[in-house]
Structure formats: structure tokens, C-alpha cells
């Protein structure tokens, strides 16, 4: 009987720009959608340098806090023009952008409510798995009771999950490591 060996892990990339992007990828909703805005930001490495070849994905509920997905326990609800998913490559300065609308609050299984947020994944070379975090909105009173935000004791770390208001939308920078490291979920 022969022994089987585990193959070594591989990092993802650098192949992101080939086949993973499409023309309207950055649009969770079409341009001109009422309430639409740009979520912009940049991805930085541990030394603070921009990451020029990452991919940032966002997914979210619609403005009513509903998903058009069979796993939504309330049932899937489609909203015309709303894709709820966007993907953007970073440019040479590490910048990304997605056009979307503000999601509604989400019920949790225990009767609480999650504040409106975007789920964010980051893929880039050198990482074995994607990183997942959330982007919250700075003007939401519901942030004070959100179960994810309130689970982070350090106010500075909690602040890494809150976008900043900018003209035309919000800015959400992602720091992979270092002093300003974004809080990521432990997948």
C-alpha cells in the first residue's frame, strides 16, 4: 500500500486580471440607480505600500435588507437591477471602486439586528486564502449594537471596519497587516 502525501499549499495569483474581471464587475447596481454611490478605497500591504494586483469583491443585502438567494431564511427576493455583488481589481496605486446602494439592516438568528454593511473579500498574491471583512457606514446609529462591531473591544481596531464619508460616496481602505491592519474574520 502506498502512502498519500498532502500537496503543498499554493498562493493565489498573480493571475487576477486574466479572466476574473468583467466590464461591469464594479457595479452592484447600474449607474443612475437612485441612492447609488461609489465605495472607493485602496489595499495596502504591511509596509503601507499599495497592492497593485489585488481583487476586491463586495456582496450585500438590498436596501430592504433582503438577499435574492435561497439561503435567505426569509426567502429569496429579487430587486430589479440589483446584483448585490461587485468585483474590482486594484490599480497601480492599490485603488479599487464599486458602485452600489446602501443595504438595509439584517436580522440575526437570535432576534438582533446587524447594522447595514457590505461584506468584503480581498484576494491577492502571497495569500493562501482570501481575507473577509465588512465595511460599515459612519452615519449608522445601528453600528452601536451591531454584533460584529461590538465584539471588537479595541476602538481603533473597530474603526478599521467603518468607511469614511467622501464626496460621491464612501472610502474604505484595507490594510492587510501592520499598525492600521483591518480586522478580518477568522475563516
Image (cartoon, grey):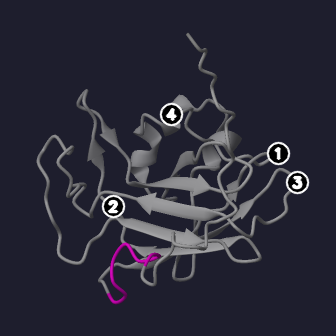
Measured as percent of width and height from the top left, residue 178 is found at 82, 45
The residue to which callout 3 is attached is 47
Measured as percent of width and height from the top left, residue 25 is found at 44, 76
> Looking at this view, is 125 or 35 the one in front?
125
Q: Residues within 10 Å of mark 1 (few under 14, many from 20)?
A: few
Distance from label 3 to label 4 (Cα)?
A: 28 Å
Q: Secondary structure at mark 2?
A: loop
Distance from label 4 to label 2 (Cα)?
A: 19 Å
Badge 1 or badge 4: first in the primary sequence: 4
Measured as percent of width and height from the top left, residue 27 is found at 41, 77
* Res 8 quadrant in image: top right
The residue to which callout 2 is attached is 103
The residue to which callout 4 is attached is 150
* Residue range (magenta): 25-32
Residue at horizontal 50 percent and vertical 33 percent from the top:
150
* Residue closest to the far right: 47
Main secondary-structure element of the magenta-colored stretch = loop
Measured as percent of width and height from the top left, residue 35 is found at 34, 78
Dots 3, 4 in contact, CB < 8 A: no
Amino acid at each position: 500500500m502506498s502512502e498519500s502525501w498532502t500537496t503543498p499549499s499554493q498562493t493565489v495569483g498573480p493571475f487576477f486580471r486574466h479572466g476574473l474581471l468583467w466590464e461591469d464587475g464594479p457595479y452592484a447596481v447600474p449607474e443612475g440607480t437612485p441612492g447609488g454611490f461609489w465605495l472607493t478605497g485602496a489595499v495596502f500591504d504591511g509596509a503601507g505600500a499599495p497592492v497593485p494586483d489585488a481583487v476586491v469583491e463586495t456582496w450585500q443585502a438590498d436596501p430592504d435588507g433582503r438577499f435574492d438567494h435561497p439561503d435567505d431564511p426569509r426567502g429569496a427576493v429579487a430587486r430589479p437591477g440589483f446584483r448585490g455583488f461587485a468585483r474590482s481589481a486594484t490599480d497601480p496605486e492599490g485603488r479599487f471602486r464599486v458602485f452600489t446602494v446602501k443595504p438595509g439592516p439584517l436580522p440575526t438568528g437570535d432576534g438582533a439586528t446587524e447594522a447595514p454593511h457590505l461584506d468584503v473579500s480581498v484576494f491577492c498574491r502571497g495569500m493562501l486564502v482570501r481575507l473577509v471583512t465588512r465595511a460599515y457606514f459612519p452615519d449608522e446609529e445601528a453600528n452601536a449594537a451591531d454584533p460584529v462591531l461590538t465584539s471588537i473591544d479595541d476602538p481603533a481596531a473597530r474603526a478599521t471596519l467603518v468607511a469614511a464619508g467622501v464626496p460621491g460616496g464612501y472610502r474604505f481602505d484595507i490594510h492587510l497587516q501592520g499598525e492600521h491592519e483591518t480586522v478580518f474574520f477568522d475563516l
